[in-house]
Amino acid sequence: MLFLRKISIGSFYKSKYEIIIMYWTLELASKLEDAPWPATKEELIDYAMRSGAPLEVIENLQEMEDEGETYECIEDIWPDYPSKEDFFFNEEEY
């Protein structure tokens, strides 16, 4: 994911845009699968730190814009997160 964040520099309120690149992989996002949903950004960061998630997960969570919203599931953070149906695996056959 690519985000632009407006930041102020100097005392004259000049601004520039900072490019924030967050990347999620299946392995990184899966570290949040068992998080206590629904959760706020701060709760997710706390969970990631306590559960020993890789530093990239924590950095990605910290880079998210926080408007005090509550995230209901991993898809709210990474919309491309695959569901069990995406794997076309029929557990009843085995």
Image (cartoon, helix red, strand yellow):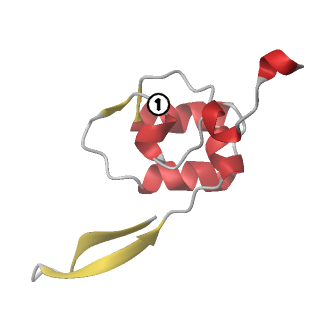
Quick check: 30 above or below 51? below
Which residue, as the protein is rendered here, is positioned at the far right? Answer: 94
- The residue pinned by badge 1 equals 73
Front residue of 32 and 86: 86
Q: Quadrant of residue 9?
A: bottom left
Which residue, as the protein is rendered here, is positioned at the far front? Answer: 93
Residue ID at (80%, 15%):
92
Quick check: 62 above or below 13? above
User: Residue 4 at what x, y percent from top left?
Assistant: 31, 71
Which residue, as the protein is rendered here, is positioned at the far top? Answer: 92
- Secondary structure found at label 1: loop
Q: Is residue 25 left or right of residue 60?
A: right
Q: Quadrant of residue 86?
A: top right
Q: Is residue 91 left or right of residue 24?
A: right
| Quadrant showing the C terminus | top right
Residue ID at (79%, 21%):
91
